[in-house]
Amino acid sequence: MRQKVVAGNWKMNTTLKEGEELIKALVSVDAKGAEVIIAPPFTHLDRVGSHMEKTDFALAAQNLSEDSFGAHTGEIAGEMLKDMGCRYVIIGHSECRGRGETDEVIQKKITRAMEVGLTPIICFGEDEEVYNSGKRMDFLKNQVHSALESVKEEEFLLAYEPIWAIGTGKTASAEDANEVIAEIRNELPEDRREDVRILYGGSVKADNVAGFLKAGEIDGVLVGGASLKADSFKGIIDEVSHV
Ligand code: PEP
């Protein structure tokens, strides 16, 4: 049985004070066996992580460098994130791909994450044009196969995030997301198929999350906007833990 996941991606939001207030309000929640993952901005990892120490919450980074230590001004190495207590790292988010992150860079980042013992949460998803083109599944399968090229036995999560649903208030229907995720699961090596957790992300809120979790193939959610308010994120965690 795969453990359910509720992951909150704070993106480039919150002052440190706001981030600390938010995590303090969240950690008391009883997630009833669902794994809660929090991805604050890099600058907040240490302080936000310190409030999560005696909890089952897991800390994630939103990105990492494709390189290790060295002359890479402005970048953050996987080793540094591991030092901060991160267990997970989001890789290939559409907002990073949109800034020019290629499939090749994503592969390197996944390799780096695994080298330092971080579990990647690998995002994939199509834009509206691909969605309407009739070639969506080919596109998504290519993204996933490319990302997993050098992955062997290491743990990873996948997150299906249709770009047209991110931050727009539009969601994929639970049936549609479920079908996509089932097809992607079938693309995984047979011996990994039943273990890998595949999430849905895109305008998830407390009042629509249950439908995704009940659909059968979706193991959890990656949440942006609704993870920034304690009440809405707690509402999501509560719904997921009762499915
Ligand atoms: C995201 O950024 O990964 C995301 C799913 O955002 P939102 O929930 O705001 O659509």
Image (spheres, helix red, strand yellow):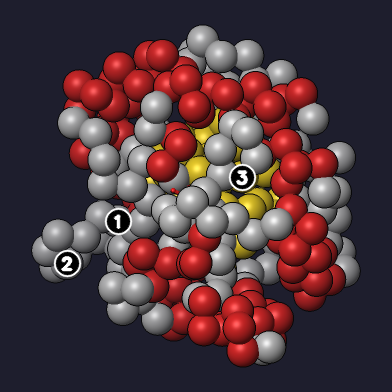
Instruction: Identify the element where label 2 is drawn.
Output: loop
- Does residue 232 appear in the picture of this structure? yes
Q: Which three-letter amino acid code belongs to the residue tagged 2?
A: His
Instruction: Identify the element where label 1 is drawn.
Output: loop
Q: Residue at x 30, y 56 (%)?
A: 77
Q: Residue at x 49, y 51 (%)?
A: 169
Tell me the tag on residue 77.
1
Q: Residue at x 76, y 23 (%)?
A: 242
Q: Which residue is tagged 2?
A: 72
Q: Position of residue 179 (x, y in %)?
A: 80, 65
Question: Which of 43 and 243 lies nearest the eye of the viewer?
Answer: 243
Q: Which three-letter amino acid code belongs to the residue tagged 3?
A: Val
The earlier-in-sequence mark between 1 and 3 is: 1
Instruction: State how far apart marks 1 and 3 are (Cα).
Output: 26 Å
Q: Quadrant of the N terminus?
A: top right
Number of numbered discs: 3
Q: Are marks 2 and 1 in contact (CB under 8 Å)?
A: yes
> Outermost residue, top direction?
28
Q: Which residue is tagged 3?
A: 221
- The correct choice, above or below, for 21 with respect to 59 in the image is above
Q: Which three-letter amino acid code belongs to the residue tagged 1?
A: Ala
Instruction: State how far apart marks 2 and 3 are (Cα).
Output: 33 Å
- Image position of 76 (left or right of 160): left
- Image position of 2 (left or right of 63): right
Q: Position of residue 57 (x, y in %)?
A: 53, 26
- Does residue 192 appear in the picture of this structure? no
